[in-house]
Structures are given as C-alpha cells and as structure tokens.
Image (cartoon, rainbow, N blue to C red):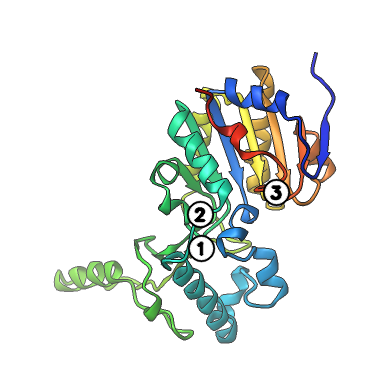
C-alpha cells in the first residue's frame, strides 16, 4: 500500500526515506526545466517573455522587430554558453553523477541552453525537447549546422546551403529548381510541431519499456502539454513497479500534476534537498 503524498516546504533535515529510494534506484528518469539553469546564469522562458525580450511564439517570424529580438536573445544565450565563466549548476552536476553511475538513466530537458555539453556523461544521455541554442536548422529540409551568432544579427537569415546545392544540382540536370529554405536558431517555438518528434517518441517508448524506478521532475511547472504527457507516462510507469516520482520546484504543481507525484519538494532545487543523497554510497 502506497504512503500518502508528502509535501515539503523549504530545507529539512531528515530525507532518509528519499535517500534510500535514490540509492536503490538503478533506472532513473529526470525531466527538467529552466529552474535548474538559473544559477548557471540563464533566465527562464517565463522571465524572458515577461521582460518582453522575446515571445518564443511561432508568430514572431511575421514581425521583423520580433525576429531581431529573438535573434538577440539566442545570441546572448549562445555567448553565455561559450563563456569561460559559465559553470553548470549544482543540480546539473548531481544529475551528471546519476548519468555516470546508473545503468539506465535518461534526462529529458525543456531547456535550450545546452549547459549539459559541459558535462559529457549527462550530455550523452540528454534528450532536448525544445531544441538547442548551439545549432541552426533549415525551415524546409531540416538540415542542421552549428549556430554562428554573427549570421543572425538582424531580421534576415542565411539561405540553407544544402537546399541551394540540391537545387543547383537539379538545374544542371535540366530540372526545375527547388525552394530554398532559410536557417534559423534550432529552437522550438510555442505552437510549432517538433521536427524530431518521431525520434523523441521512440526514445520515450524505449525508456518506458525499461520502466524507471525513480522519476525526478525538477525546475519546471510542466506547463507545456507535450512535456507534461511525457512526465505522466514515466510517473505511471514508476508506480507500476513500486517506484516513485519526486517534484522539486519553487512552485507547487497544479492539481493534475500533483496527483502524479509521491514527494513534492517546494524550493530551489539546489537548496531544498541535500544534494549528496543522489550520490551512491561507498
């Protein structure tokens, strides 16, 4: 019989039950949001939208002014990512340890900041649900290349070289030319379909077959339906094998998300819980 939901506000001393759960879990899934990157120097999407830096909505491409704001935001994030001063947050380091020590581990993140690239074990096991600021993608053929900030200074964007090559090859054969796409930051905007949906769903299915024993939902309100659906499936899977799901965020979950969780920890993910509980005992 399952114990009732535990909601914990702020740091407390006794995490023995949760510590034991973490130590025994060999199959772990983490679903993260912007809350884990704030201490690494990155703003949350919500903060950026409130400050009107950019809307992150698909409609922004209908306005030159909004395109310029969007490009400026992505350039700033890219600059921050490549700065020598950028350090992964304490929680990033914790889940990197989980990635290194657990035989079955996966990190699904809604973040686009790519802080995980500074932690190779974590980076190798991270699925990015909303894209990444260190890449550009063609809007027509989905060709991906490295993001180069100087190419995205104004509202214009570079033509896709792959589209151009394919079109030119057809012209040389006497065939009609093809439409040429333009590069844009490889960031999923609100209201857009994900170009990598099939690959992501296949990874989710594989991880569900393995069946996690512990699910950590960290630094996110799960406001995006796709991420919320993924989290729900993993939480149900963990319960089916006697595992548990843990919510760690500054805000309480909505009622429909709270029903998925066995522990609800309210506070900064770097402070509300002793991070050493995630390390394997000697």
Q: Nearer the viewer, residue 193 or 273?
A: 273
Q: Residues within 10 Å of mark 2 (few under 14, many from 20)?
A: many
- Report which quarter residue 30 is drawn in: top right
> Would residue 204 appear left or right of 191 to someone viewing this image?
left
* Residue at the farthest top position: 1
Picture residue at 50% right of the left edge, 74% below the top:
76
Q: Nearer the viewer, residue 45 or 130?
A: 45
Earlier along the polypeptide chain: callout 3 or callout 2? 2
Q: Is residue 175 visible?
A: no
**Quarter the N terminus occupies:** top right
Earlier along the polypeptide chain: callout 1 or callout 2? 2
* Mark 1 to mark 2 CA distance (whole Å): 21 Å
Task: From the image, tell me which residue sits under label 2.
Answer: 88
For the residues labelled 1 and 2, say whether their Cβ atoms are less than 8 Å apart.
Answer: no
- Point out the frontmost of discs 1 and 2: 2
Check residue 222 in the rendering and tell me which mark sits there, or answer none: 3
Coordinates of residue 7 in the picture (x, y in percent): 83, 36
Picture residue at 19% right of the left edge, 73% below the top:
171
Check residue 187 in the rendering and tell me which mark sits there, or answer none: 1
Q: Is residue 90 visible?
A: yes
Picture residue at 38% right of the left edge, 71% below the top:
181
Coordinates of residue 120 in the picture (x, y in percent): 38, 46
Picture residue at 39% right of the left edge, 60% below the top:
142
Task: State whether residue 41 is above or below residue 274.
Answer: below
Q: Secondary structure at mark 1?
A: strand
* Mark 3 to mark 2 CA distance (whole Å): 22 Å
Q: Secondary structure at mark 2?
A: loop
> Would residue 157 appear left or right of 255 to someone viewing this image?
left
Task: State whether residue 277 is above or below residue 11.
Answer: above
Coordinates of residue 255 in the picture (x, y in percent): 84, 41
């Amino acid at each position: 019989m399952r114990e009732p939901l535990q909601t914990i506000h702020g740091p407390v001393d006794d995490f023995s039950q949760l510590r034991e759960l973490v130590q025994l879990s060999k199959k772990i899934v983490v679903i993260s949001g912007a809350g884990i990157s704030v201490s690494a120097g990155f703003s949350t999407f919500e903060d950026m939208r409130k400050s009107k830096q950019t809307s992150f909505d698909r409609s922004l491409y209908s306005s030159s002014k909004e395109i310029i704001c969007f490009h400026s935001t992505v350039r700033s994030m890219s600059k921050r990512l490549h700065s020598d001063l950028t350090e992964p947050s304490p929680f990033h380091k914790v889940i990197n340890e989980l990635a290194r020590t657990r035989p079955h581990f996966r990190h699904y993140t809604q973040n686009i900041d790519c802080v995980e690239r500074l932690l190779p074990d974590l980076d190798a096991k991270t699925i990015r649900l909303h894209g990444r600021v260190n890449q550009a993608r063609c809007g027509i053929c989905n060709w991906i290349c490295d993001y180069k900030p100087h190419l995205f200074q104004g509202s214009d964007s570079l033509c896709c070289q792959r589209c151009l090559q394919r079109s030119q090859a057809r012209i040389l054969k006497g065939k009609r030319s093809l439409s040429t796409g333009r590069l844009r930051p490889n960031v999923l905007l609100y209201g857009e379909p994900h170009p990598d949906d099939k690959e992501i769903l296949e990874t989710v299915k594989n991880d569900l077959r393995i069946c996690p024993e512990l699910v950590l939902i960290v630094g996110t309100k799960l406001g995006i339906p796709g991420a919320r659906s993924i989290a729900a499936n993993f939480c149900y899977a963990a319960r089916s094998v006697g595992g548990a799901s843990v919510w760690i965020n500054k805000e309480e979950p909505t009622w429909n998300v709270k029903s998925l969780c066995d522990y609800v920890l309210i506070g900064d993910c770097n402070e509300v819980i002793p991070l050493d509980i995630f390390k394997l005992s000697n």
